[in-house]
Image (cartoon, rainbow, N blue to C red):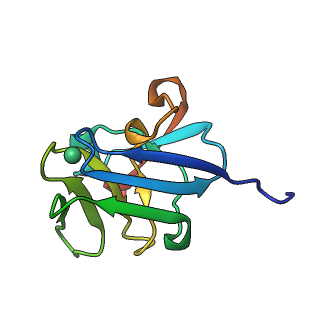
Amino acid sequence: MGEMELKKYKGGCHCGSISYLFSAPEITNGLRCNCSICIRKGAVMTAFTVPPEDMNVEVLGDSLSTYQFGSKTAKHHFCNKCGIYTFHEPQSKPGHFRLNVGCIEGVNPLALVVDTFDGASL
Ligand SMILES: [Zn+2]
């Protein structure tokens, strides 16, 4: 495979308290997961994770909250003003971000090819 060209994307929560810029390969497909938390969120997520050096997050005040459960390895981040799940740090890759595609400008999560990840069986 050749060198992957990265695109610049921006996104954020609904009320604008959390915004971010990141670089990633063009988003052509998405991912859904059936684990106990993803099945409740129902969000289409990026199929890739973004390393911290390619992600720039801006938060107004204390609007970024984090939910953890079980082994408390994964960090499920959300805006505590508007309630929107913006991104999380997966159990398999702490410090990296998987994003809610619905929060990304210019990308329609309903138009993507969406694969399902069987997180419930892990
Ligand atoms: Zn918000």
Q: Position of residue 92 (x, y in %)?
A: 43, 71
The quadrant holding residue 91 is bottom left
Residue at 48 percent across and 47 percent down: it is 10
Residue 87 percent coordinates (x, y)? 35, 55
Q: Position of residue 118 (x, y in %)?
A: 41, 49
Residue 27 shows in this picture: yes
Residue at image position (18%, 67%) is 68
Q: Is residue 9 left or right of residue 88?
A: right
* Image coordinates for residue 45, horizontal then vertical, percent: 43, 45
To which quarter of the image does residue 119 belong? Answer: bottom left
Q: Say which quarter of the image contains residue 23.
A: bottom right
Q: Is residue 38 above or below residue 62?
A: above
Side (left or right) of 64 relative to 29 = left
Q: Please state if 13 lies on the left or on the right of 102 as rendered.
A: left
Considering every residue shown, the one lying at the far top of the view is 111
At 48% from the left and 55% from the top, the residue drawn is 21
- Which quadrant, please, contains the N terminus? bottom right
Q: Is residue 5 above or below residue 54?
A: above
The answer to whether residue 118 is above or below residue 108 is below
At x 38%, y 40%, the residue is 103
